[in-house]
Image (tube, rainbow, N blue to C red):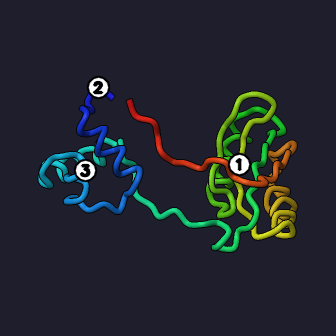
Amino acid sequence: MEKLDNIDLKILRELQKDAKLTVKELAAKVNLSPSPVFERQKRLEKDGYIKGYMAVVDPVKSGNGIMVLCNVRLKHHNKEFSRQFTSVIADIDEVVECFNTSGEYDYQLKIYARNMAHYQEFVLGTLGDLDCIGSLHSIFVIGEVKNSRIVPLG
């Protein structure tokens, strides 16, 4: 964060709130002319502070009525099982986030499913086919209190 000044931080804050801002709109919000804002934004992208831009899709309206947090314990703690698990998980559409965790479980998955039958089929047919998995623990999300991708900035 040493390279970032207050203007850079303002740009990042504004883009986290609304990534569809035009350079002109962004410039007005950070009290700078569009040309330097454009250059700063491109530098923030090039330096990896901005990883990308995306639309946030409503999971329920898109047919995914159930969110599940699935805790996974591998059969054995070794590189082979870890690589096998992460390479397969990376290609499964239902898994939208995967975290390598400490504690009782090795990974936590955030999964969207259409309904309970879809989740059951997913567990038995997709995760169940992975020999590296020792056990699963599913937590069904009843409601979201907060869902933010906004990173706090200094």
Question: Local crowd at mark 1 within 10 Å, few (<14), some, or many (≥20)?
Answer: some
Q: Which mark's residue is nearer the viewer, 1 or 2?
A: 2
Q: Which corner quadrant holds the C terminus?
A: top left
Residue 12 horizontal/vertical position (percent): 34, 44
- Drawn side of residue 42 relative to residue 92, left or right: left
Q: Amino acid at mark 1?
A: Leu
Badge 2 marks a residue whose secondary structure is loop
First-in-chain label (1 vs 3): 3
Badge 3 marks a residue whose secondary structure is helix
At x 18%, y 49%, the residue is 37
At x 45%, y 36%, the residue is 152
The residue where tag 3 is placed is 29
Q: Which mark's residue is nearer the viewer, 3 or 2?
A: 3
Q: Nearer the viewer, residue 83 or 66?
A: 66
Residue 106 horizontal/vertical position (percent): 74, 36
- Drawn side of residue 50 relative to residue 142, left or right: left
Q: Which mark's residue is nearer the viewer, 1 or 3?
A: 3
Q: Amino acid at mark 3?
A: Lys
First-in-chain label (3 vs 2): 2
Q: Is residue 97 above or below residue 20?
A: above
Residue 98 horizontal/vertical position (percent): 65, 47
The residue where tag 2 is placed is 2
